Image (tube, rainbow, N blue to C red):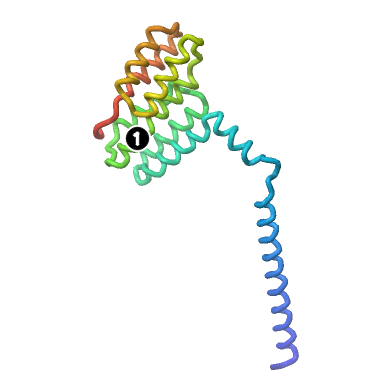
């Protein structure tokens, strides 16, 4: 081996050694950083997301995107629905309910949709309305029934809520849309 080749090989080993040291130092910093508490910022951020319904919406969205994979129209409808929820356009959410309801969904997609729509309707009820103290308990029962999939209780509580509350025309329409979508889908259109 010539002197130039030996020098070149040593330089390559040194470069490799420096690179490995840099990688190890970076990994060490990452490990140290992940061990730090950062003053509870991670927990605070998580609680803010959860308090604003973001955590549950994120879970619903991820679930729908995952199960609708391969069904482009259903996936696009789920994305549109989630966008409307995020933007607080609750009346437009039900346009997407109708689109999804009209699709030929597989049994797994149908099951996931039925599970998700109760939680979404509950979210719309909680976020789209401000009930007085006397009706808060009734609204909470309706929301709980929607989330749990108890269609008869949800229908009953929503009906009582609609007749007991003084609603604007848009609120009345929104509550009617929630009521109209309580029952689970039994099959694609």
Choose top left, top right, bottom left or bottom right for residue 116. top left
Q: Residue at x 37, y 19 (%)?
A: 177
Q: Nearer the viewer, residue 141 or 9?
A: 141
Q: Residue at x 28, y 30 (%)?
A: 185
Choose top left, top right, bottom left or bottom right for residue 151. top left
Q: Residue at x 27, y 41 (%)?
A: 107
Q: Residues within 10 Å of mark 1 (few under 14, many from 20)?
A: many
Drawn side of residue 98 relative to residue 86, left or right: left
Q: Quadrant of the C terminus?
A: top left
Q: Nearer the viewer, residue 119 or 8?
A: 119
Q: Quadrant of the N terminus?
A: bottom right
- Compared with residue 13, is residue 56 higher up or lower down, i.e. above or below? above
Choose top left, top right, bottom left or bottom right for residue 100. top left
The residue to which callout 1 is attached is 113
Q: Position of residue 162 (x, y in %)?
A: 39, 11
Q: Nearer the viewer, residue 29 or 72?
A: 29
- Compared with residue 63, is residue 24 higher up or lower down, i.e. above or below? below
Drawn side of residue 179 relative to residue 17, left or right: left
Q: Position of residue 68 (x, y in %)?
A: 36, 42
Q: Nearer the viewer, residue 174 or 134?
A: 134
């Amino acid at each position: 081996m010539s002197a130039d080749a030996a020098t070149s090989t040593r330089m390559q080993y040194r470069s490799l050694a420096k690179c490995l040291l840099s990688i190890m130092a970076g990994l060490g910093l990452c490990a140290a950083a992940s061990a730090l508490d950062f003053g509870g910022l991670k927990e605070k951020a998580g609680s803010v997301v959860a308090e604003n319904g973001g955590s549950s919406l994120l879970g619903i969205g991820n679930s729908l995107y995952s199960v609708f994979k391969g069904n482009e129209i259903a996936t696009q409808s789920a994305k549109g629905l989630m966008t409307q929820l995020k933007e607080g356009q609750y009346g437009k959410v039900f346009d997407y309910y109708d689109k999804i309801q009209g699709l030929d969904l597989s049994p797994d997609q149908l099951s996931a949709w039925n599970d998700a729509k109760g939680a979404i309707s509950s979210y719309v009820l909680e976020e789209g309305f401000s009930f007085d103290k006397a009706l808060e308990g009734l609204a909470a029962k309706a929301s709980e029934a929607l989330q749990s999939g108890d269609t008869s209780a949800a229908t009953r509580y929503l009906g009582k809520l609609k007749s007991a509350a003084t609603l604007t025309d848009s609120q009345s329409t929104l509550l009617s849309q929630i009521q109209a979508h309580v029952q689970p889908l039994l099959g694609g259109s």
